[in-house]
Image (cartoon, rainbow, N blue to C red):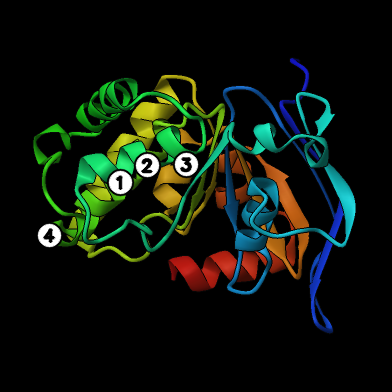
Amino acid sequence: MNEPLLQLNNISKSFGQIKVINDFSLEVFPHEVLTIIGPSGSGKSTILRLINGLETMDSGAILFHGQNMKDSNKLNQLIGIVFQSFNLFPTISVLDNCTLAPRVVKKISKQKANELAIKHLNSVGMGQFINAKASTLSGGQKQRVAIARALCMEPEVLLFDEPTSALDPELVGEVLDVMKSLAKQGMTMIVVTHEMQFALDVASRVIFMDEGKIIEEGTPSDVLKTPKNERTKRFLKRLLG
């Protein structure tokens, strides 16, 4: 197997007296689609925020291409994140939402940033909305713009933090279709989600988290259809009825 692209080694994180991540280790390989499931409060979103550098760990190390991410701010630029609540700037255009970070962070020209943005907005079916203000879009459209915005930084890994949970049910499919397309193109993805069918159809591996630890991991079929751990079984029974 290839060398891991991303390694989390013995990560721990507490907020006050509450330990959210507990001696957590994980390897993610190039072109893998890793899906993380688990109950609310299990630490799923915190893991993504630690990987992306939005939170700092108490102990442990995160390696990217074998290099400690603490040693280089530029490594964080290679890991994009798509949030549950879109996090677009509502009063500026779709195009400006997508070009802001490449211009400010990567210092690329306005022309190149615009070209990148138009390319990625077209790829998610939002090219015709480049001049629209973000506030005028539907939830599904906002999330597709958020994905395009993340792609404009040309990341090697994309993190998705429950990207469909804030959407009306009829809008979920348009976002999942974009994610499926990215998976087919070979994008390395870590997806926190409750969309079990997406995990079955697209993921290469599923992990079940509880109390800041990995309780079970394996192929989507193994974890979701024939789980071995009783805690996993109880969670899936409640989730799937």
SS class, disc 4? helix
Say which residue label 1 marks: 97
Residue 202 is marked as none
Name which residue type carries label 1: Asn
State whether residue 219 appears in this view: yes
Say which residue label 2 marks: 100
Neighbourhood count class around disc 3 (C-alpha, 10 Å): few under 14, some 14–19, many 20 upward: some
Marks 1 and 4, how far apart in space? 13 Å
Viewer-proximal residue among 65 and 38: 65
Say which residue label 3 marks: 200
Viewer-proximal residue among 38 and 127: 127
Percent position (x, y) of residue 210? Answer: 71, 67
Residue 136 is marked as 4
SS class, disc 2? helix
| In the depicted structure, whether residue 241 falls above or below residue 137 | below
Name which residue type carries label 4: Thr
Neighbourhood count class around disc 2 (C-alpha, 10 Å): few under 14, some 14–19, many 20 upward: some
Q: Name the quarter where the N terminus is drawn.
A: top right
Percent position (x, y) of residue 37? Answer: 58, 57
Q: Which numbered disc flags the more N-terminal residue, 2 or 4?
A: 2
